[in-house]
């Protein structure tokens, strides 16, 4: 993509916590920063990605251009990269997939979006697939200026991902695609991790500091259990080879309804307290 267009997307992404318009609107987008193979300078590129549990995949398509994009050459020289997803920034290690691993992921990508096949058809080169895995050992670097703003950013990321999954489900046919299954499982994993962190750290700290919050925290604990049950049902459905998109849509809708009410209640009652504690 032209440099000026890239920079506009980067600026909009950073100014709006990962939300952009234009061709990327409503899609999954990261900013990938590599180290220039020749210059040694940081080089940031907006890229679409595929979720995959604890890692993500990016594809060096360059729109089907005859040559690999600059960012791909950079990570071949130095696989240590930085990923921004609008909620937090983390260091990652890039690994170029080969053989059956590459073919399997690319097939999933094409099944989810035929545009990848169109890019491959335009060029004689094999479009590389790259796995990005976090190498952070400490807490993530959140974009929020305050604890309350950070909580909202995390919640909004879950809202956006649910909206994207619902859009994908609405567009799918009678067969549930492999990548869509993984998207749903990755969402469940991330939400489970978030709630586990709240249960083990944030909620006990708030109970100790603010005893009068007990009724609010009791309700949030119960909502965590209900959401966990909905996610377990969703996982069971996804484990069935013959799972139908229609049934999955109903389960995702139930999860969305329950989660939105939970997130809104938590923000209303905890953000003022979190920001007061930080102040």
Image: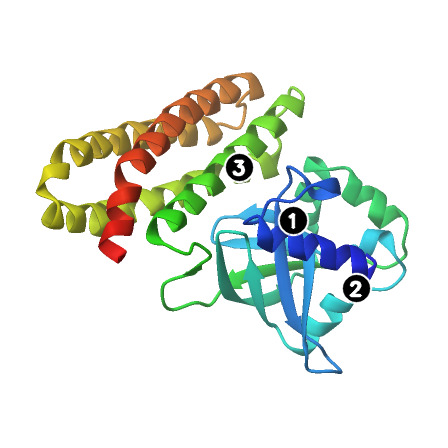
Disc with the residue nearer the chain's start (3 vs 2) = 2
Residue at 37% from the left image edge and 24% from the top image edge: 258
- On screen, residue 167 above or below 36: above
Q: Which residue is mark 3?
A: 160
- On screen, residue 203 above or below 88: above
Please rate how many residues cluster around mark 2, counting C-alpha atoms within 10 Å: few if below 14, some from 14 to 19, many from 20: some
Task: Report if residue 100 is visible in the image.
Answer: no
x and y percentages locating residue 267 in the rendered image: 33, 37
Element carrying mark 3 = helix
Q: Which residue is mark 2?
A: 69
Label 2 to label 1: alpha-carbon separation: 19 Å
User: Which label sits in the foreground, 3 or 1?
Assistant: 3
x and y percentages locating residue 132 in the rendered image: 57, 61
Q: Which residue is mark 1?
A: 105
In front of the other: 157 or 183:
157
Label 3 to label 1: alpha-carbon separation: 23 Å
Residue 273, by quadrant, is top left
Task: Report if residue 103 is visible in the image.
Answer: yes
Residue 176, by quadrant, is top right
User: Which label sits in the foreground, 2 or 1?
Assistant: 2
User: Which label sits in the foreground, 3 or 2?
Assistant: 3
Q: Residue 19 vs residue 89: left or right?
A: right
Residue 1, by quadrant, is bottom right
Residue at 43% from the left image edge and 54% from the top image edge: 144
From the image, which quarter does the C terminus lie in? bottom left
């Amino acid at each position: 993509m032209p440099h000026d267009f890239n920079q506009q997307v980067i600026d909009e992404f950073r100014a709006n916590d990962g939300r952009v318009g234009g061709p990327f609107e409503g899609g999954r987008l990261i900013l990938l920063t590599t180290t220039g193979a020749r210059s040694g300078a940081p080089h940031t590129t907006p890229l679409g990605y595929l979720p995959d549990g604890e890692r993500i995949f990016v594809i060096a398509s360059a729109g089907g251009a005859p040559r690999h994009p600059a960012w791909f050459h950079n990570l071949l020289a130095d696989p240590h990269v930085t990923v921004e997803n609008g909620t937090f920034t983390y260091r990652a290690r890039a690994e170029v997939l080969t053989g059956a691993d590459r073919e399997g992921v690319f097939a999933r990508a094409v099944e989810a979006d035929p545009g990848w096949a169109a890019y491959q058809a335009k060029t004689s080169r094999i479009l590389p697939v790259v796995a990005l895995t976090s190498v952070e050992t400490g807490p993530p670097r959140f974009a929020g200026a305050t604890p309350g703003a950070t909580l909202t950013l995390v919640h909004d990321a879950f809202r956006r991902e649910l909206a994207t999954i619902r859009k994908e489900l609405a567009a799918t046919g009678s067969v549930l695609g492999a990548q869509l299954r993984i998207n749903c499982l990755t969402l469940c994993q991330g939400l489970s991790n978030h709630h586990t962190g709240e249960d083990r750290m944030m909620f006990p700290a708030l109970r100790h500091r603010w005893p009068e919050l007990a009724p609010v925290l009791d309700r949030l604990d119960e909502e965590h259990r209900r959401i966990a049950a909905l996610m377990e049902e969703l996982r069971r459905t996804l484990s069935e080879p013959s799972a139908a998109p229609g049934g999955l849509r109903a389960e995702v809708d139930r999860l969305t309804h329950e989660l939105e009410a939970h997130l809104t209640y938590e923000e209303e009652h905890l953000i003022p307290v979190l920001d007061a504690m930080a102040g």
